Image: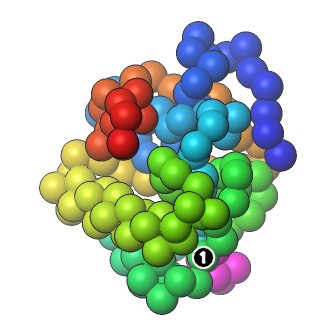
Amino acid sequence: MKSDSSDSSDSRLQASVFMNGRGRIADPHDDLPDICWVTAHLPESMSCDGQSDEEIMNLVLCKIQIGNVIIGDCALHSLGFHCLSLPVKGTPRENTGEVLSYAETLTEWWLKQIRMSRACLDQYSIFEATTRSLEHTNSLEDVPHGWGQAR
């Protein structure tokens, strides 16, 4: 499921499902070590523009809180699945509870950004896309992960 790309000038990055006024926000690339992805699958009944970004993020938050997610080594959004994947620094072998706690904090942060109109979801990537684009217009400094810093 991992993709190669010449689209992005920085091979450490790939496009996320989050956007801001400058475009698609960057996520760490699937191939980076010590990164795992927490994926919340969404109901097949959901579709592009059928619900608000806030409704989607509230559902993702609930799924993380009850542990109804998949923790894996790559993002699953934009590959034909109805889901949203969040990058988390660490590995589930170290501490699954810590991974889920970080994913919950990250989801709450994104939900706040959406509520303040600082970010939005690319619902096409969540519900319809079957190929992940690595193109993004922002660097990792635009988001709270701090991927370039030691944890």
Q: Is residue 35 left or right of residue 101?
A: right
Query: Based on the displayed image, in which of its 4 quarters is residue 127 positioned?
Result: bottom right
**Under tag 1, what secondary structure?**
loop
Query: Based on the displayed image, in which of its 4 quarters is residue 126 positioned?
Result: bottom right
- Say if residue 42 shows up in the picture: yes
Q: Of 3 and 94, which appears nearest the observer? A: 94
Residue depicted at x 36% and y 42%: 151
Residue depicted at x 48% and y 48%: 89
Q: Is residue 40 above or below residue 147?
A: below
Relative image position of residue 139 (x, y in whole percent): 40, 24
Q: Magenta-highlighted stretch: main secondary structure?
A: loop
User: Callout 1, which amino acid?
Assistant: Val
Relative image position of residue 97 (x, y in whole percent): 47, 74
Q: Is residue 127 above or below residue 62?
A: above
Q: Is residue 130 left or right of residue 145?
A: right
Q: Of 124 and 93, which appears nearest the observer? A: 93
Q: Is residue 128 above or below residue 45?
A: above
Q: Of 123 and 38, which appears nearest the observer? A: 38
Relative image position of residue 93 (x, y in whole percent): 63, 63
Q: Is residue 27 left or right of residue 81?
A: left
Residues drawn in magenta? 41-48
Q: Residue furthest right?
A: 1
Residue depicted at x 31% and y 64%: 105
Residue topped by disc 1? 69
Q: Residue furthest left?
A: 116
Query: Based on the displayed image, in which of its 4 quarters is residue 134 positioned?
Result: top right
Q: Residue furthest front?
A: 94
Relative image position of residue 31 (x, y in whole percent): 70, 34
